[in-house]
Amino acid sequence: MKKVLNIRFYTIFLIILTLSMSFYLVSCKPEEIDPPVKYDEQSGVFICNEGNFTYGNASLSFYDVKTKEIKNQVFYNANNFPLGDVAQFMAIFNNNVYIVVNNSGKIVIINKDDFKHIATIPNLTSPRFIEFIDDNKAYISDLYSPYITIIDPSSNTIIDNIYVGSSTDQMLKLNEYLYVASWSFNNKLYKINSTTDDLVDSIEVVKQPNSIVKDKYNRIWVLSDGGNVGNPGGQEIAALTCVNTSDFTIEKTFTFSDIEISPTELKINKTADTLFYINGSWGGSSGNQSGIYKMSVDASSLPSEPVIPEENHLFYGLGINPQNSEIYVSDAIDYVQQGIVFRYNADGIRLDSFKTGVIPRAFCFK
């Protein structure tokens, strides 16, 4: 019995000794680690994928322009928790990415190079867009709240608000003023002093201004979709309005030809002399006229033909690369499956296409 125990003890001892030596040899061997991906060396495009309303399946994609490689779910993969419900918009400021998550009522801040979560600004009503003034001030518009929220980007905290009395949407800073479109059921362009945070003026444009840009003359262009027949106050014919900022008056208005046309996503190119927008309708298309339109800021009339026809796609989001004026347009397909993004040069020649998350909407260029 004693001999058996000794044999067992000796066997166990040899096993432990062998494992210990193996561990020692492995631990002394240099560890083979894959080099980290250096996103900071990449020029690329972030894509906010809205996801389905109330489903909480919003996501973030990143497209590497040099390699033509698309990375989906980069937020979740970097942080191991979901982004939230409806990723509406995003902007880069001081090396950080600010993602507006509309139906979750929050702004999510991540590092632009490794996508790691930095902070979250919660308890917003229905945030739509963010516009940065300086290192200590940024404005957040809201679909349902009559207030514009003011945050401090240095601490990512809410510091104040501005009462405007209605919903607010896209914003644009020009000199010391902030210009704000009031989209939902409204027809106003607000002017706010960004130093004092006072609402100083407003003008009426065509119903439901959904996007604004500034041109090389420091004029503001406002694209209004006109609403639809079910809106309070009914529907108007969509229009593109040019506002002279020196005296805050309407310089000219271009009215679309058909009340069913609902143009969206007004953008401008690198040199601020050419406008782009999606021409669609509340029904999802406008026949042969739907697509991406291109227009000089010096034009005397609206363009008659799209530079990129919509054909059998469902154009939803539009982005213009500020470095080279390349065009990015998303196809929401059926609002359920993964969407597609098409990349074109400034003349409308297709360069690439790639799949993203569900309902790709906003583009942010790195």
Image: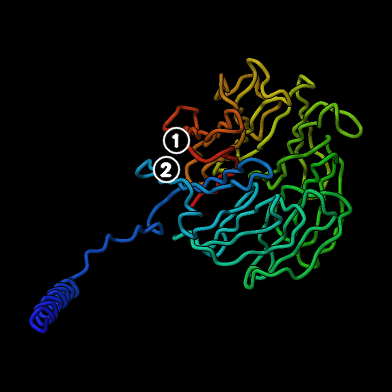
Say whether residue 247 is visible. Answer: no
Using the image as rendered, state which of residue 186 and residue 239 is in the foreground: 186
Q: Find out whether the residues at labels 2 and 1 contact each other: C-beta distance under 8 Å.
A: yes
Kindly identify the amino acid type of the residue bearing the numbered disc 1.
Phe
Crowd band around label 2 with a 10 angstrom C-alpha radius: few (<14), some (14–19), many (20+): some
Is tag 2's residue or tag 1's residue first in the polypeptide sequence? 2
Residue depicted at 65% across the width and 66% down the height: 134
Residue depicted at 85% across the width and 54% down the height: 146
State the image coordinates of residue 332 (x, y, percent, origin top left).
58, 32
Using the image as rendered, state which of residue 70 and residue 224 is in the foreground: 70
- The residue at which mark 2 appears reads as 70
Crowd band around label 1 with a 10 angstrom C-alpha radius: few (<14), some (14–19), many (20+): some
Distance from disc 2 to disc 1, alpha carbons, whole Å, reads 7 Å
**Element at label 2:** strand
Kindly identify the amino acid type of the residue bearing the numbered disc 2.
Ile
Q: Is residue 170 left or right of residue 199?
A: left
Residue depicted at 63% across the width and 35% down the height: 275
Q: Is residue 164 above or below residue 302?
A: below
Q: Is residue 300 above or below residue 89?
A: above
Say whether residue 350 is visible. Answer: yes
- The residue at which mark 1 appears reads as 354
Q: Residue furthest bottom?
A: 2
**Element at label 1:** strand
